Image: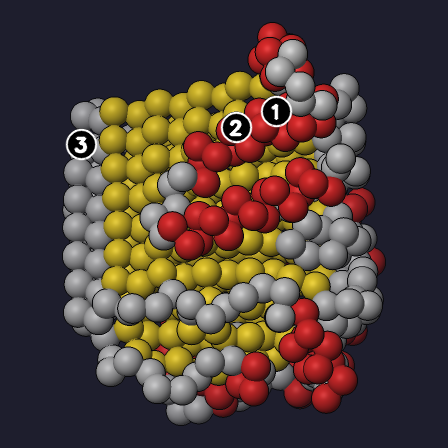
Amino acid sequence: MNVAVAKTNDAQAVGNLFALARDGLPGKGAVASARQKAFETFQRIGLPHRRLEDWKYTDLRVSMREVAPLASPPDKAALSCAGDALESYPTDSARTLVLVDGAFAPQLSNVAKFEKGLTIRALRDVLESGDGAMQSRLTASATSADPMIALNTAMMTDGVVIELADGLELSLPLHIVHISTAKNAAVFTRSLIHVGNKAKATLVERFIVAEGADAYQVHDALIVSIGDHARLDHVRLMEDARDAFNISTGIVTVGSHSHFNTFCMTSGGTLSRYQAFVKCTGEHSSVATNGVNLLNGTQHGDTTLVLDHAAPNCSSREVFRSVLDDRGHSVFQGRINVHPDAQKTDAKMMTRALLLSDEAEADNKPELEIFADDVTCGHGATTGALDESLLFYLRARGLSEKEAQALLIAAFVGETIESIVSDDLRDVAMATAERWLAARR
């Protein structure tokens, strides 16, 4: 019996979008073939919906409805607007790599005098080069069953490819800044960072908006590989426009005796989802994932973390906090998979939500899947309001209600922000939280 699969309207619309854009996307041969396979995967599923277990709280068919047209390459006016936006975010103490409407902008980036052993290339150049090995790494997720990873693979336009040689310890953080200047347009970016054996680096990702941009969509992916005896500290701050959509994915592999420390804060966008897939592939590796959602109005923020322990003697800690006002909706899905060979795993997960309104909603879904018998694993979740006795105590000492709330909220998220190793980056994250607190007064 022949069974015809009916295409959804969103898949048909994106099909037209892909057909129009395909000839202008970078990469031929194997890259083009990987794009086609990925798009066929997306076509079979379409935009994620609540019948997909991993997307049950974030139904893009209802919330986003369609994929916007591909953004045009930034012109002189867009680059000028992006430069103005960049001035509000000091980057003097980092090596800055700027993407404007999904295109790498070397004129706004700090790409001079690389340390020996550091290589930085634009994704477009890599896809159009003859570097088959790197192209394979960039398109390895083409067969992913996740529709948004598949769509990103099919449509990726630009990004940065960063490689650290063995033993290199960067003196300055790498700072990837995504700046949106477009209206009603979509960008598809993909970046890769490889940290060699015994190398160390700090990576900052920031999503910001230039004046006049609205109703845009960001579709981003970051592929990370960390060698043996290496370390990567990762800080991600999402401050997109209030009517923007941001769907981002991180795919991380961690080698033996290595450490991956990541922090994510979401305070922008009307709908966002950050999904990270982290795999410990070598013994004695450790992972610390921390995050904060600061949401109000009708914002929807989804953080989905999947951590695979595939080697013995590894440890992981997940700490997530959300602060919700008005009708804000936060989703945390955390799954820890312990493979049969991953004996002596030590994994813990905790999520806490602070509700400032009766209409706010927090959905927490921690999961453990354990196939080894000598492990220490646990998870927990709590949801509650501000402590009335503490509010009374602070107000009795002359603080207004909003000031007292802000002090308690800052303490609530501060514990998570403390996981950031760098003092400067910790201050940047706290300043982001303080801006959100000041805006709700």
Pointer 3 residue: 344
Binning the other alpha carbons within 10 Å of mark 3 as few (below 14), some (14 to 19) or many (20 upward) gives some
Q: State the CA–CA distance, disc 1 to disc 3.
A: 34 Å
Instruction: Quickly name the residue at label 2.
Output: 412
| Precedes in sequence: disc 2 or disc 3 | 3
Q: Is residue 400 above or below residue 137?
A: above
Inter-mark Cα distance, 2 to 3: 32 Å
- Residue ID at (22%, 58%): 230
Residue 76 quadrant: bottom right
Farthest front residue in view: 398
Q: Horizontal and vertical percent for residue 306?
A: 44, 42
Please indicate whether residue 202 sits to the left or right of residue 398 in the image: left
**At 76% across and 35% down in the image, what residue appears?**
441
Q: Nearer the viewer, residue 92 or 22?
A: 92
Mark 1: amino acid: Leu
Q: In the image, is residue 133 above or below residue 437? A: below
Q: Amino acid at mark 2?
A: Phe
Q: Mark 1 — residue?
A: 354
- Residue 141, placed above or below residue 429: below
Helix, strand or loop at mark 2: helix
Amino acid type of the residue tagged 3 in the rendering: Lys
Q: Upstream in the sequence, badge 1 or badge 2?
A: 1
Residue 6: in sight, yes or no?
A: no
